[in-house]
Image: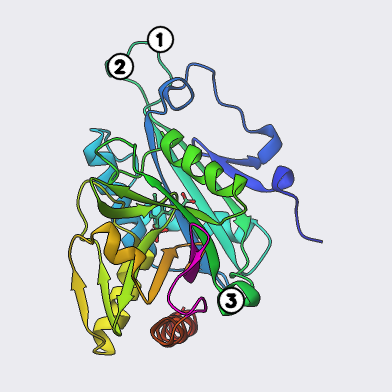
Amino acid sequence: MRKQPTDATVYLNGQFMPAQEARIPVLDRGFIFGDGVYEVIPVYSGHPFRMEQHLKRLQRSLDAIKLANPMTMAQWSRLVRRVVALNDGADQAVYLQVTRGVAKRDHAFPSHVSPTVFMMSNPMSAPARKLVSSGCACISATDNRWLRCDIKSTSLLGNVLMRQRAAEAGCLETIMFRDGFLSEASSSNLLVVRDRAVTAPPNNHLVLPGTTNDVVIELIRKARIPLELREIPEDEVRAADEIWLTSATKEVLAVTRLDDRPVGGGKPGPVFRRVHRLYQDFKRTVMRRG
Ligand code: PDD
């Protein structure tokens, strides 16, 4: 029988233990300030997908918050594989988090403190067939988050409130606009299709550089589908033929309703269907290679 999240095996500061036995001191700066960064790595048939890219982004997040990486890439990689092996399920989502550690409460960084390293893995299932074939509904909002959305920080209150708005509206995500331009969604990146050409916002401080988005962009380039990376005005998004969400756990999904109006024909479009197929093929190839 599959383990419940509470009896999953987690990693905390050098030790493996059942999730319900893992304890963090209340003065951990992750708890007090949200002073930490994280990653979510999808695992298919036991193989971590794009692990190197996730670990490189972790390094960029750590550099941005001036926190030394407590492990080498090889150590991270071994640890991820170990946590996967200790948990049930061929497909899993590994969550890892590094915080600045435990210290007397003071906004300034403490000296000589060890970071807290936590890792868990939860069973993951690919988006339901129906969601892929029908698409999802989203709402929109003004992006009111901070100006360093490129850091994968555990301080996620802005994203949490946006995602909750979507949940209360019976939608999957909130699509955000800042100063009249598309940024990203509560926990996904976005691409837009018009006249069979794909446009995506460039990576900058206003969006998380998505690992799934990178895969999708590589596949689009390989398939020679027209692609432009540039700022996308809100009216262009609202007039799009297709809008797609990407994230490690959602893969690539079509948005078929935005603010209760259909996107394009109200069904996943032809460019989405092609790229979704390419994504599934790519995943299978990578998994076969191991
Ligand atoms: N979220 N933008 C935001 C704000 C995100 O939180 C995420 C992912 C993405 C997509 O990134 P990637 O393709 O690397 O998953 C974009 C993860 C899955 C989460 O917080 O659970």
Indicate which disc, 3 or 2, sits on the residue closer to the N terminus: 2
Q: Nearer the viewer, mark 3 or mark 1?
A: 3
Q: Residue at position x 25%, y 71% from top?
A: 199
Distance (Cα) linking label 2 and label 1: 8 Å
Indicate whether 96 appears above or below 30: below
In the rendered image, the vertical position of residue 109 relative to residue 54, given as above or below: above
Residue bearing the label numbered 2: 110
Q: Mark 3 or mark 1: name the one nearer the start of the chain.
A: 1
Label pair 2/1, CB-CB below 8 angstroms: yes
In this picture, residue 144 sits left or right of residue 147? right
Q: Which residue is mark 3?
A: 134
Q: Nearer the viewer, residue 141 or 225?
A: 141
Q: Position of residue 104 (x, y in %)?
A: 40, 9
Horizontal side, residue 268 vs residue 4: left or right: left
- Magenta stretch in the rendered image: 252-268
Q: Residue at x 65, y 57 (%)?
A: 87
Residue 254 on the magenta span: yes
Disc 3 residue type (three-letter):
Ser
